[in-house]
Amino acid sequence: MGATYDFTGRVALITGAGSGMGEEYAKKLASSGCDIVMVDIEPNNLLRVHDEIKRFERKMISFHIDVSNYKDVYEAVKKALHTFNKIDILINNAGITGTVPVLTENIEDEEWDRLINTNLKGAFNFSKAVIKPMKERKYGKIVNVSSSAGRSVSENCGSHYAASKAGILGLTRQTAFELAPYNINVNAICPGIIDTPMLRAVSEESSFITGASFDLNGGSLII
């Protein structure tokens, strides 16, 4: 990532922060001055990332919850607001690929529900939970992590994964439309097969961009 942005005074909530892209988002934002709220279903991963981010001397809290459970999501957001008085940035990153590879006719009901609930409902749950406090402050940045599979097809992860990521794009467009009058930007990024992309969609310079989807795939999907 070539540019460095100053997020001092901002508070970012990142789901799926215990590994992969979510971990990198948390580290990059913390290194740029952001206070961090981390969410992950794996408590040991949260502890590891928490220890690694300590060097940035930012205030941090973490929650070990299932993003598909709205009650737990609401309580986590409530506690985060009590700690920081605000949430400036929400990164809906938590997601799973499920049992792969799998053909549509072989997807079990439980597998479909588990993946849709984590990938799509999780993003909906956290968006729903932060919208009211963001609207009250008339400020917010919501970044939904979709996938190139949501824009096209999934060669490896199946139709349940593609459907969940396509649903995230619909959620992004609709919430961006609803929240634009409140100075809240909602955008999606659509990574391809990437190791640890740095988050750029939450820059203060992007205040005129909302409802957009950004493809980060090295040219593997050109549409």
Image (cartoon, grey):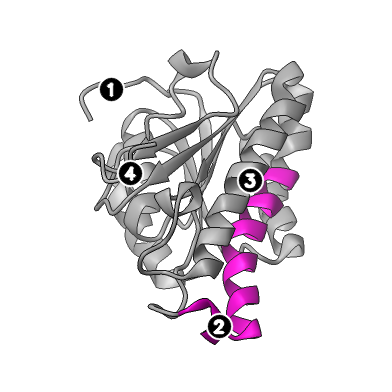
Q: Residues within 10 Å of mark 1 (few under 14, many from 20)?
A: few
Quadrant of residue 65 within the rendered picture: bottom right
Secondary structure found at label 4: loop
Which is in the foreground here, disc 1 or disc 2? Answer: 2
The disc, 1 or 4, on the residue closer to the chain's N-terminal end is 1
Q: Is residue 208 visible?
A: yes
- Residues at discs 1 and 4 in contact (Cβ within 8 Å): no
Residue at label 3? 80
Q: CA distance from mark 3 to mark 2?
A: 42 Å
**Residue 184 placed where, x, y %?**
66, 24
Q: Amino acid at mark 2?
A: Glu
- Residues at discs 3 and 4 in contact (Cβ within 8 Å): no
Q: CA distance from mark 3 to mark 4?
A: 37 Å
**Residue 116 placed where, x, y %?**
62, 66
The disc, 1 or 2, on the residue closer to the chain's N-terminal end is 1
Which is in the foreground here, disc 3 or disc 2? Answer: 2
**Residue 129 placed where, x, y %?**
73, 46
Q: Is residue 65 visible?
A: no
Which quadrant would the N terminus be assigned to in this image? top left
Residue at label 2? 105
The disc, 3 or 1, on the residue closer to the chain's N-terminal end is 1
